[in-house]
């Protein structure tokens, strides 16, 4: 009888151990992949997103003085963002392919955001080993064009995203307008979008001789006027 009780007790302890191990594994599901962006220069803007997964993205900028900062993110928390003087590390990333897009020359004037060029793009694979990307200065601007989009100050959103030919160009924060330099000349489709507002589509023809300016009104969703 004693041996039988010992055997039963041992089985119960083993079952409890397996159950505890399962609970422990399930209670900590956060991934551990990391991506370090090196050479984060002054006046840079960087956009990182997981390929085919809109639920995970991060947009970072660095002013002329000071470290980079996380402007906004989806699927990440503040603890996943580690900033050094010349680099940024995103942690707790799921395995997979990521697109890294960056621009140089971003300047924030009073009520205005300036963005130079269409930037550079690199695709990386995040897995068990840490991944590193060096943000070299983008080159090869096709033409010295300038596009100004002005959406006004009164009742305007604080956070506006800009797309050119369905390509994400960047964000303007607490600005009334955005200027983009170095787009290809010719006919371009521009979309500006903000949460809670109707997106605005513009069709412009950019020239290397004169700058192009468009004034738009951002209307809140649900309004009929």
Image (cartoon, rainbow, N blue to C red):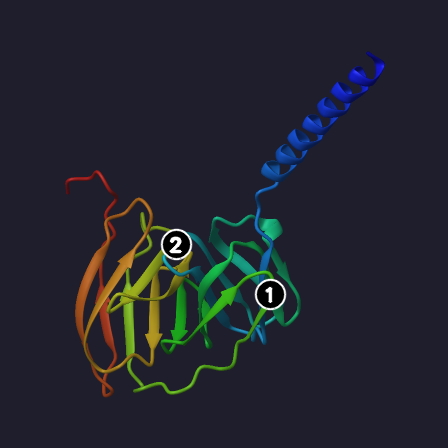
Foreground of the two, 126 or 224 = 126
Nearest to viewer (mark 1 / mark 2): 2
Foreground of the two, 203 or 82 = 82
Q: Secondary structure at mark 2?
A: strand
Side (left or right) of 2 relative to 61 = right
Label 1, label 2: how far apart the Cα atoms are: 21 Å
Q: In the figure, residue 67 lies in which quadrant?
A: bottom right
| Label of residue 117 in the image | none
Q: Is residue 93 above or below residue 132?
A: above
Q: Is residue 66 above or below residue 152?
A: below
Residue 102 at x, y percent in the picture: 45, 72
The residue at which mark 1 appears reads as 88
The residue at 38%/53% (across/down) is 54
Q: Quadrant of the N terminus?
A: top right
The residue at 21%/57% (across/down) is 200
The residue at which mark 2 appears reads as 53
- Crowd around label 2: few <14 · some 14–19 · many ≥20 (10 Å): few
Q: Is residue 171 above or below residue 199?
A: below
Residue 34 at x, y percent in the picture: 59, 60
Outermost residue, top direction?
Answer: 1
Q: In the figure, residue 164 lies in which quadrant?
A: bottom left
Side (left or right) of 40 relative to 101 = right
Q: Quadrant of the C terminus?
A: top left
């Amino acid at each position: 009888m004693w041996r039988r009780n010992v055997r039963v007790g041992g089985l119960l302890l083993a079952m409890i151990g397996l159950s505890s191990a399962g609970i422990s594994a399930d209670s900590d599901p956060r991934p551990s992949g990391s991506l370090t962006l090196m050479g984060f220069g002054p006046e840079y803007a960087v956009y990182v997103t997981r390929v085919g997964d809109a639920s995970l993205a991060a947009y970072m900028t660095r002013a002329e003085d000071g470290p980079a900062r996380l402007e906004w993110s989806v699927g990440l928390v503040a603890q996943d963002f580690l900033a050094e003087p010349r680099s940024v590390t995103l942690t707790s990333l799921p395995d997979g392919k990521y697109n890294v897009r960056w621009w140089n020359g971003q300047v924030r004037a009073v009520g205005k955001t300036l963005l130079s060029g269409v930037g550079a793009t690199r695709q990386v694979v995040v897995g068990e080993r840490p991944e590193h990307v060096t943000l070299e200065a983008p080159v090869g601007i096709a033409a010295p064009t300038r596009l100004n989009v002005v959406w006004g100050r009164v009742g305007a959103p604080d956070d506006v995203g800009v797309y050119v030919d369905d390509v994400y160009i960047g964000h303007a924060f607490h600005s009334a307008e955005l200027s983009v330099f170095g787009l290809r000349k010719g006919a371009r489709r521009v979309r500006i979008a903000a949460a809670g507002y109707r997106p605005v589509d513009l069709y412009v023809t950019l020239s290397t001789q004169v700058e192009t300016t468009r004034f738009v009104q951002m209307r809140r969703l649900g309004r009929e006027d």
